[in-house]
Amino acid sequence: MSQNPENLVEQVEKTTKNLSRPPLEQWHPELSGKMDLRINRDGQWIHKGEPLGREAIVKLFSTILRREEDGQYYLLTPVEKWQIQVEDTPLLAHSLEVTDTGEQQIITLTTNVGETLEVGNDHPLEIGHYEGSEQPRPLIRVRHGVDARLVTAAYYDLAEHVVEQTVDGKPVLGVFSNGNFYKIGQGG
């Protein structure tokens, strides 16, 4: 067992050769330990104090990352499980695009690892707040408990598509995507 990113890459590539995405829901290894890997608030992956140099490793690691019920993040292979540190969210979402209008509107975001996500049932949008602050914390669910935080520019782009709806007799601000209404805030 090794904390070396190259060894984990090799293990995952062998196991998932013919799969589009690693089957994390089927992998339940025992904890191997803590890896000296941290994802900072800017989405940079830092291993032993140095940025991970290969973009391909970051992309692969994003597919084997799971957030578990304990709120911690783990890199998984079929036989290894390494806890890592995440300062805010492991991924960032940018490049917001909107097709159609009204309830037929579809909002698409691209993550910092190049994955395109449509806001909808599989990738819901949630606007929370940072702890102890009213500063919005817009998130899109990626998979396996992992979220991507919308960068400021994407959040402002999202704000251009906000509409007011009445929910439970109260005005609510939000956006439509894939037929769902995602609450952003209280209406007027």
Image: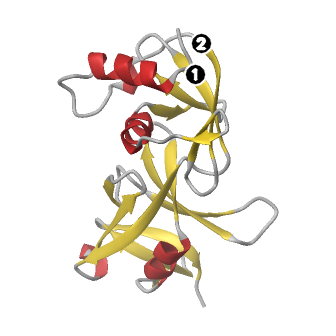
- Please say if 86 is above or below 166: above
Question: Residue at left 33%, top 25%?
Answer: 23
Give the vertical position of 111 relative to 87 (above or below). Answer: below
Image coordinates for residue 16, horizontal then vertical, percent: 27, 22
Q: Residue at x 77, y 58 (%)?
A: 131
SS assignment at label 2: loop
Instruction: Work out whether 188 lies above or below 1.
Output: below
Q: Answer yes or no: is residue 61 visible.
A: yes
Of 107 and 156, nearer the camera is 156
Residue occupying the point 31% across, 74% down: 97
Q: Work out whether residue 100 or residue 188 is closer to the camera in this orientation and state it.
A: 100
Question: Closer to the camera, 175 or 99?
Answer: 99
Task: Classify mark 1: residues with Cα within 10 Å, few (<14), some (14-19) or many (20+).
Answer: many
Q: Nearer the viewer, residue 9 or 68?
A: 9
Are the residues flagged by discs 1 and 2 in contact, CB closer than 8 Å? Answer: yes
Q: Report the disc number at residue 127.
A: none
Q: Is residue 167 visible?
A: no
Outermost residue to the bottom? 188
Numbered tag placed on residue 32 in the rendering: 2
